[in-house]
Image (cartoon, grey):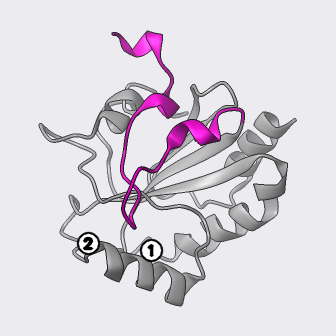
């Protein structure tokens, strides 16, 4: 099977709290996939991500957080610690997957499908840092990539989401 035979949402990945994250449930929705970390200078982006979730969830949108500890060990916690931090500190209601690797030999298949897509500056390939964002369209294909420094509520992210929601 090749990547062209499947969408990003066909990849199997575990949920943070156990079991499957069941990505196919998001078919027909717009999904913002973000590699997240609890101890990063960009961690306050959880606030903006949650605001996007609250603003657009009723229109067929979700944020999907993917914890990763590959950038200076900034997501060292267990699944329980990550869930507690996200809930207690930022009131996160969007789904989180199991902690995975996004780069290197252990790169999760989800990120194998994502990293080939270039952002507006032409960057493709390895994830640069925590909070790199990929917008998945209703058809399950990547439609936009945003750098880690791009705020979730920035004009370009909001416009891309709005375009997918119609």
User: Can you say whether 82 is above or below 119 in the image?
Assistant: below
Q: Secondary structure at mark 2?
A: loop
Picture disc at residue 74: 2
Q: Where, by quadrant of the figure, is residue 78 drawn?
A: bottom left
Q: Residue furthest front?
A: 19
Q: Where, by quadrant of the figure, is residue 135 drawn?
A: top right
Of 75 and 2, the residue lying toward us: 2
Q: Residue at x 51, y 23 (%)?
A: 7
User: Can you say whether 99 is above or below 88 in the image?
Assistant: above
Image coordinates for residue 18, horizontal then vertical, percent: 36, 62
Q: Where, by quadrant of the figure, is residue 137 drawn?
A: top right
Classify 10 Å Cα crowding around label 2: few (below 14), some (14-19), many (20 and above).
some
Do the residues bearing badges 1 and 2 touch, measured as CB atoms within 8 Å?
yes
User: Can you say whether 143 is above or below 3 in the image?
Assistant: below
Cα–Cα span, label 1 and label 2: 10 Å
Q: Is residue 68 left or right of residue 144?
A: left
Picture disc at residue 43: 1
Image coordinates for residue 26, horizontal then vertical, percent: 63, 41
Q: Number of marks in the image?
A: 2
1 or 2: tag closer to the N-terminus:
1
The image quadrant where one finds the C terminus is: top right
Q: Residue at x 81, y 43 (%)?
A: 162
Q: Secondary structure at mark 1?
A: loop
Q: Which residues are magenta?
A: 1-28
32 is within the stretch colored magenta? no
């Amino acid at each position: 099977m090749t990547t062209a035979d499947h969408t990003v949402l066909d990849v199997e990945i575990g949920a943070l709290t156990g079991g499957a994250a069941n990505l196919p449930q998001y078919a027909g929705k717009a999904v913002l996939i973000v590699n997240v970390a609890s101890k990063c200078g960009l961690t306050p982006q959880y606030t903006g991500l949650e605001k996007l979730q609250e603003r657009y969830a009723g229109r067929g949108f979700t944020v999907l957080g993917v914890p990763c500890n590959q950038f200076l060990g900034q997501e060292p916690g267990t699944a329980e610690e990550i869930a507690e931090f996200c809930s207690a500190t930022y009131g996160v209601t969007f789904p989180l997957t199991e902690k995975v690797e996004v780069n290197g030999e252990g790169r999760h298949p989800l990120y194998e499908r994502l990293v080939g897509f270039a952002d507006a500056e032409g960057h493709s390939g390895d994830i640069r840092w925590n909070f790199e964002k990929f917008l998945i369209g209703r058809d399950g294909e990547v439609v936009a990539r945003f750098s880690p420094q791009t705020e979730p509520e920035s004009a370009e992210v909001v416009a891309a989401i709005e375009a997918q929601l119609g």
